[in-house]
Each structure stands twice: as structure tokens, then as C-alpha cells.
Amino acid sequence: MFLFGFMAQPLAAQQSLPPAPYAYRQLENPAKEAEAQALMETLRCLTCQSQSIADSDAPMAGDMRHQVRTRIAAGEEPEAIRAWLVERYGDYVSYAPVMSETTWPLFAIPLLLLAGAGSILWRRLRRVR
Amino acid sequence: MRWWWWIPLLLFAGFLGVAAYQLTQPKNDLVPSAMVGKPLPEFDLRAAAEGMPGASTADFHDGKPRLLNIWASWCLPCIAEAPQLDQLKQEGAEIVGIAIRDRPEDVAAFLARHGNPYTHVGADDLSQVQLAIGSSGVPETFVIDGEGVIRYQHIGDIRAEHVPILLEKLREAGE
């Protein structure tokens, strides 16, 4: 009982409002739900930071899922919803990699290394022959 | 051994050096809003507590800069910042509150216990305004100028040292 007293402590900071309607309920249309699910898996939970909103039980992640599902149900494109969030939180909110001013070396360096290794290999093999 | 054979090893050592340095740096958990400098998104929220007006975008268009405080009665740091909000009010700041995922009776109890610095308190039950404004937690405080443009974001509870900064940002927003 003593232990339970401790476990109950964090609940003091919990919220009493029920989750948003579409936080834990799937869309009736399976195709739309699949679209929503794919998008939710690539959006970052902002209060937990290392989970996607599909993985998180944080109330804010629930509200984000509600927003994603209702917008998809209303016919909005997944990429438009992602863009709306990126406009507010920056690239940080999205797990989908994009090429930008700061990220281009991540894409360029492997290609350069491959090209370098290829040219060395080519010269060596030519010498052998 | 030719000298340039050492280049890959030096590059690797450099990489290790950068990684070691970054590991010693404190982690930055703050998610700044990209909405600073942009107009406040449209919203019209019902009152979060009886006897208080709700909050809407229209409240921010009368030429007077205001603070927009995102908070909740269930949020512990919000209790810590209550005295600072009260001080800001004493210094002439008008503060509009938005209560996230909150019940009217809880909001009323919080305001009765910790003081009410707000002119308006809107209820954001689905965090819609919070998401639209680019806020990622409670509490956060935004400075909104008289035309309804977001000018500054303060993340986390307001401590004593932040009060002069917010007053200065409010003054700048009024120029």
C-alpha cells in the first residue's frame, strides 16, 4: 500500500480531460486510416521527442493524432498536413528526411566516398592488368 | 609510407574529437516555434472558467501588445510561474491565457488558489491552438504585438530573471 502511494504521486500532475475523439479511434475508412497511420509514424511527438505520435501515449500526441485523422478524413493530403506542422515546428517535427541547406552533406558525402573508392579501385585494377 | 596515407586516420581522429566535444555539451530540449514573426493563427475559444471572457484572435487586434500564456491547471511549473505572471500584470502587461485540456472547475480552483493575472482565458480542449501556434508544451508565453503578430516566444516557466526580458519585448512590440 505504501508503494502504491508513491506510484499515485505522478498522477497529481495528470490531466483529467478524456483523450481527443480520434486519439485512439481509427477512421471508419480503412484506406484513409492507412494514410493517417503512415503519416503519424513519421511525425515526432513534441513532448516525448524520441517517439512518433503513433507510438506515444502523451496527451499532446493524442491531440496530434486527432488532428491528423480528422484532416485526412476531411480530404487533406498527408504531405499538406506535414507541411503545416513543419511551418510551425520546423523540420524537427518530421522524421521524413529532406535535402536542405544543412542536410545536403549527409547525402553528398556518401556519394563522394563511393566515387573516391571507385576511382582508387579502378586505378589499382588497371595496374594489375 | 607516404604522408597522405595518414589523411584517413586524421579525418577519423577529427570526427572522434567532434563527437567527444558534442557529448560534453548540454542537451537542448527546447523546440522553438517557427511562428515567431508571423500573424497569430485564427481561433475563437470558449471561456475556460465561469465569469471570464474566452480568448480569440480578435482580442489581439486593438493596437496594444499583449502576452499570450499557454498553461494548464494540471501543469506544475505553471504554479511556479504564477507569481511572475502576477508581477507582469502589476507592471502593466495584459495577459491572455489559453488553458490546455482543462476543466472549468479545475481552472477556477487554480485561479482562486494561485491568483488570476488574466484578462481572458480560453479553453483549448484538443490542443488545436497550441499546435497552430507552434507551442510544444506548457507553460509557454508569447509576446503578441498590437497587430496580432507573434514577436517573441518564451519556453518554460517564467522565472524572476525573465520578467524584465518579457517587459522589454512587450515595449519593443509596442513601438
Image (tube, coloured by chain):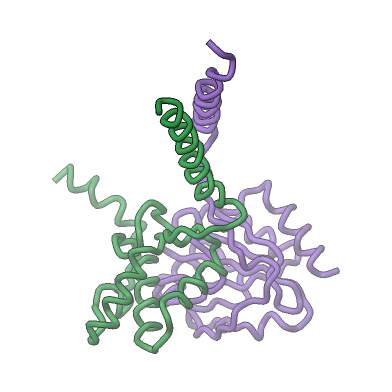
Chain colours: A green, B purple
Where residue A122 sits in the image (x, y, percent)? 45, 35
Q: Residue at x 39, y 75 (%)?
A: B103
Q: Is residue B81 visible?
A: no
Residue B66 place in picture, x, y as percent: 70, 71
- Quarter of the image for the C terminus of chain B: give it: bottom right
Instruction: Compare residues A9 and B169 and report the one nearer the observer.
Output: B169
Would you say B36 lies left or right of A1 here?
right
Q: Residue at x 52, y 22 (%)?
A: B13
Relative horizontal placement of residue B86, taking residue A109 as reference (left or right): right
Residue B55 locus on image (x, y percent): 58, 81
Q: Nearer the viewer, residue B3 or B123?
A: B3
Q: Is residue A23 above or below residue B158?
A: below
Residue at the farthest left position: A1
Q: Residue furthest top?
A: B1
Q: Nearer the viewer, residue B83 or B145?
A: B145
Residue at figure coordinates x 53%, y 72% from the top left = B98
Residue B4: % across, % down: 58, 19
Q: Relative to A4, is B136 above or below?
A: below
